Each structure stands twice: as C-alpha cells, then as structure tokens.
C-alpha cells in the first residue's frame, strides 16, 4: 500500500506532465504498478518526450524535476542504454525517472505499468517486454565468474602471505560477490539483478547459508575459515552450473590454486 508521501509524489509528477507540452505520456512501473509496493518502495517513473524537445528537457532536467519535487540527490545515469534521472527527495522518497522519445521507448521498462498521462494514446495496448539478457551474454558472464574466482583466491593468498590483511579482505569480498552471482544464476539464469539486490527473494535458504558462512572479522583464522567456506560454495554451485549449461569446469585451474593455497587453507576437496 502506498504512503501519502509516495502518492503525493506520483500525483505531482503527473500534474506537471499534464501541463508540460514537451511531455506526451507518463507512466509508473515497478512494485507500484504490480500492486506489491510498501512504504519503502521506490518510485519507478517514466516519461515520453517530444523528439524536438528531448535534448532541451534532458539538459534542463533539474528544473523539470524541481517543478514537482525537492530533490536532495539528482543524477543523470545512462548505463542501461537510455537516459534515467536517479533521485532522492527531501521527504525521503527515492526513485528513478526514465525518459525516451515517442518513436523508441519499449526498452526503458519491462512488465506491468500504470498510465498517468497519455496525450496522444501512445500507450494504448502497449506491452513492455521484460528486459532479459541474451543467453550468450549470460554464458560469458558465468564463465568469467567461474574463472576469476580463482584469480581472486590467488591474490588473496599473496596478500595473506605478506600479512596485508586489509588487501586480503578486498579479495574475500570479490570472491563472495562472485559466489553471490553464481547462486543468482543458479536460481534464475536470465537474472540481470546485481549481486545482493533482493537476494533473499530469489535464492534459497541453503544457498544463503553458504554465503552467510563467508563473513568474518579482520582476523587471520576467521578469514581463512571464510575463504574455505567460499571455496565450498563455489565448488557446489559452479560445478552444477557448468554441467547444466555445457561449460567446462576449470578443474586444472582449481587444482593449481588449491595446491598453491594449501598452506593456508589446508587440504580441500579437489573434485567439483
């Protein structure tokens, strides 16, 4: 259920879009459109801008946002292949505003949405396809996590031998992130969510327990135990993924690194 602040933010945005001749249509997506929102939900807003006014609105995006909100954080982001304004408002509401031209906008959103403004019926009957990465992309991503895990372990070993514990902690974090990506791919191979984002909603408790066991204090023995747990997690999940998706498990790489780190980790099982 939406809070008054959330609803007020949506209503003010819609009102400005109605009055602004540059805006042809506006919509809201995410958990709000899916009717699963709670008091902590973001505002996932979108606007279709007249082609001839697009560059102007983008260059004046702060003035546009300030017509309907009081942003304390407002940044332009285009890492998803379209222009997005990421905001945090003075009242604590946060969210994103994706914008596009009317001749190309299906890529800015995926799934359910609710129309706020549609001056030229651009959204009549429109279905936004779920944005899913291609299988080849996911296979390359999987292979990278599988192989670079061992590179991280090699560098962790060097840092530990030099007693550079803070450096070592960084490599533990990197190995943990790779394991998180692997358990995500195991649960949903087409997932494009990042690392810990809503992890508890898509990954089973058994896999979460494997990750949980890899957190430690800045202590040599605790860190060694954490890395041992990460190796076990990696072996269990990546071997299954490799078999499922026709990739070669990096056995030689594993054997080399488990031999190299045996002085710290002790003898670990070498079979995936």
Image: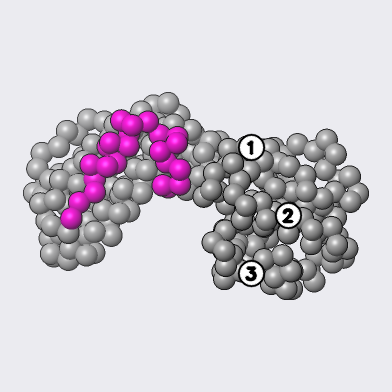
**Discs 1/3, front:** 3
Cα distance in 3D space between marks 1 and 2: 18 Å
Residue in the picture at 50% in, 45% down: 193
Mark earlier in primary sequence (2, 3): 2
**Circle 2 is placed at which residue position?**
11
Q: Which residue lies most toward the right here?
A: 120
Give the crowd class for mark 2: few <14, some 14-19, many >=20 residues within 10 Å.
some
Residue 68, how many percent across, how many down?
72, 65
Does 254 appear above or below 69? Answer: above
Give the crowd class for mark 3: few <14, some 14-19, many >=20 residues within 10 Å.
some
Residue in the picture at 39% in, 26% down: 243
Within the magenta stretch, is there residue 233?
A: no
**Discs 1/2, front:** 2
Residue in the picture at 13% in, 64% down: 163
Q: Is residue 162 shown left or right of residue 32?
A: left
Secondary structure under tag 3 reads: loop
**Circle 3 is placed at which residue position?**
70
Q: Nearer the viewer, residue 159 or 62?
A: 62
Residue 197, how many percent across, how many down?
45, 47
Q: Is residue 130 shown left or right of residue 147?
A: right
Residues drawn in magenta: 195-217
Mark earlier in primary sequence (1, 2): 2
Q: Which quadrant of the rendered structure holds the C terminus?
A: top left
Give the crowd class for mark 1: few <14, some 14-19, many >=20 residues within 10 Å.
few
* Residue 206, numbered label: none
Q: Which residue lies most toward the front here?
A: 4
Q: Which quadrant of the rendered structure holds the N terminus?
A: top right
């Amino acid at each position: 259920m939406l809070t008054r602040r959330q609803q007020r933010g949506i209503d003010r945005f819609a009102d400005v879009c109605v009055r602004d001749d540059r805006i042809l249509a506006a919509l809201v997506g995410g958990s709000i459109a899916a009717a699963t929102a709670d008091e902590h939900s973001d505002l996932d807003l979108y606007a279709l801008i007249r082609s001839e006014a697009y560059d102007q609105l983008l260059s004046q995006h702060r003035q546009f946002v300030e017509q309907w909100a009081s942003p304390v954080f407002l940044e332009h982001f285009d890492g998803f292949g379209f222009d997005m304004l990421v905001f945090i408002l003075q009242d604590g509401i946060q969210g994103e505003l994706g914008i596009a031209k009317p001749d190309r906008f299906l890529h800015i959103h995926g799934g359910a949405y609710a129309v706020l403004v549609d001056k030229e019926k651009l959204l009549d009957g429109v279905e936004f396809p779920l944005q899913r990465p291609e299988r080849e992309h996911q296979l390359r991503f999987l292979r990278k996590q599988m192989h670079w895990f061992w590179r991280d372990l090699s560098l962790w070993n060097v840092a530990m031998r030099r007693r550079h514990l803070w450096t070592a902690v960084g490599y533990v974090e990197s190995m943990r992130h790779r394991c998180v990506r692997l358990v995500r791919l195991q649960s949903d191979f087409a997932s494009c969510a990042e690392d810990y984002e809503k992890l508890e909603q898509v990954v089973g408790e058994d896999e979460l327990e494997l990750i949980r066991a890899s957190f430690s204090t800045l202590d040599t023995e605790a860190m060694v135990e954490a890395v041992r747990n990460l190796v076990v997690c990696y072996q269990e999940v990546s071997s299954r993924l490799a078999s499922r998706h026709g990739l070669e498990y990096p056995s030689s790489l594993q054997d080399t690194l488990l031999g190299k780190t045996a002085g710290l980790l002790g003898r670990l099982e070498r079979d995936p």
